[in-house]
Every structure is written in structure tokens, then in C-alpha cells.
Image (spheres, rainbow, N blue to C red):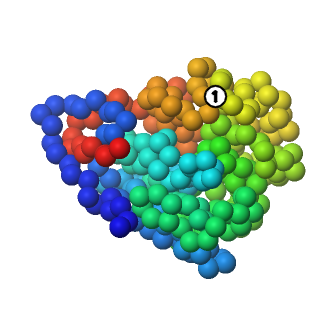
Amino acid sequence: MSFDPASYVFSQPSGPTAIRASTVLPARRENVELRTADGHRLVGELALPESGEVKATLITLHPLPTHGGFMDSHVYRKASYRLPALAGIAVLRFNTRGTGSPRGTSEGAFEEGIGERLDVEAAVKFAVDRGLPNRWLVGWSFGTELALMYGASEPVASEVEGAILLSPPLHRATDVHLKEWAASGKPLKVLVPELDDYLQPAGAKERFEVVPQARVVGVDGAKHLWVGEKYAGRVLNEIVEEVLPGGAGGAGTELPQSWDGPVATAHA
């Protein structure tokens, strides 16, 4: 049975609640389906601010599904729990072809990042069709490859503002793709863990030199999977700072660490 985001049970604490890994803040959440040009049905979830305008939209591309990556990978799950309420940001998460999660399993099979081009296009088209504004690709690990390979070419490029990359391995994405990003002029923010297993900050700065507008940010003490609330929180702050410059505190954005209102608790 597919997970229903309406199943969260919210309660009103007597005072502010510390935001922890499993804290779910209010949002309008719905299960969604994306349709690819080659006929696959992809499952996902859209989390929108409960009220007020949508200030930005994150189209998330998850880590490698053959190594445990899916739409519920923890940074993206926390983004969907928090950012609609804390920053007015919509979060679209979905499973690429052949990937499963509690939400369900997307049709198709893993295609090493090739067929997934159509998955990226379907996700962006969904966001456009829903009228979601200020659209950004957010890729993590394998998801950064998809963002780099397909985000600076049509039909995606004209529909997104830029991309944020978490732990890019640069295995599939080549200098050809980086040069496409350079030519596009679109912003590219690259968060690189100090202790990454694949590409560390010094190497990342060298590789991304071909993209003049790329901003490589090394994160001391972090690892490829951004384990720990300290590092997940840092990622969310960096994302908000990029997609809402000046709109949520500007440089050095710090999201609130507590919430005075209804909260729910997610099951592990």
C-alpha cells in the first residue's frame, strides 16, 4: 500500500517544539504521478506551503537507486518536512524509473542515467504545468549527474533557474556537460563534503573551474551522505540561501530550529 502523506497526525504542543529529524511541520502534501515521454508512471510527493505564496520550488533528484537512493533519502525527506512551513518553498520528490520507496515503485528499470533524462524532463514539466514558480533542480550524488547532464539543455534549461548539487561524484557527468552549464550562465551551487568518498572540495574546485558561475562550498566534517542533523541542517540552509537570496535572511541563512504551532512525528 502506498504511503499517504495525509496520515500524519498533528497536535498542538503547549509551547515551541525543537525541530528534530522526525519532526513534520504543516504543509499541503499530496501523492503525485509523473508521466514520462516513453510511457512510464513515476510516483512522487508534492509538499506545498499550507498558506501563502510559493516562493520557490525544489525539483529533487535522488541518490543512486542501486545503492539505496530514493525519494525518501533523508535530506530530501527533511526538506519536505520543513521548507514549506519555514521558507514557503515547494518540494517535489519522486522515484526515478525502477526505484521503490514507501510511496510506491516507479515503472521501468534503472538505466544508468540515460533513460532517466526523460524522468527529469517529466518532473520539470509537472512543476511547470502546476504553475510552481522559481524552479530549481536539487541533485544529490547520482542526482547531481542527472542535473548536470540534462539541466542545461532543452527542454529543461528554459524552465529552471539553476541547480544545487550535493556530493557530486562527477562519474557520469563530463566536462562537456559542465561546459553546457557554463554556456547557459545559470547558477550552480555545489556543496562538497570535506570527507566525501568520491570528490572532495579541492578536487571539486578544480573540476568546476570550467563553469565560471559555479560556486563550490566545502563543508568541514561532512561525509557523502550528510549524516547528522548538523549537516542536513546546513544543506537546507544553503539551499534556502540560494533559491531565496535576501528573501529568507540572505547570506548566512539560518532556518529556525524550533516551531510554535502544530507538529507531527514521522515514523522511521
| Label 1: few (<14), some (14–19) or many (≥20) C-alpha neighbours in 10 Å | many
At x 33% / y 59%, what residue is drawn?
5
Return the x and y of residue 232 as percentages of the image width and height.
49, 33
Tell which residue pokes out farthest to the bottom in this image.
39
Image coordinates of residue 101 in percent, x first then y, are 46, 57
How far from the left and from the top, in percent, is residue 235? 53, 34
Residue type at mark 1: give it.
Answer: Pro
User: Which residue sits at x=28%, y=60%?
Assistant: 6
Residue 189 shows in the view = no
Left or right: where 82 falls relative to 61: left
Question: Along the line of sight, which residue is nearer the eye, 30 or 157?
Answer: 30
Instruction: Residue 77: give x, y in percent of width and height.
Output: 44, 47
The structure residue drawn at horizontal position 54% and vertical position 39%, both measured from the top left corner, is 239
Q: Quadrant of residue 87?
A: top left
Q: State the SS at label 1.
A: strand
Q: Is residue 220 above or below residue 13?
A: above
Can you tell which quarter of the image residue 30 is in? bottom left
Q: Quadrant of the N terminus?
A: bottom left
Circle 1 is placed at which residue position?
A: 193
The reply to whether residue 204 is visible in this rendering is yes
Q: Residue farthest to the left? A: 14
| Residue depicted at x 44% and y 29% | 229
Above or below, 119 against 262 in this view is: below
> How many discs mark residues in the rendered view?
1
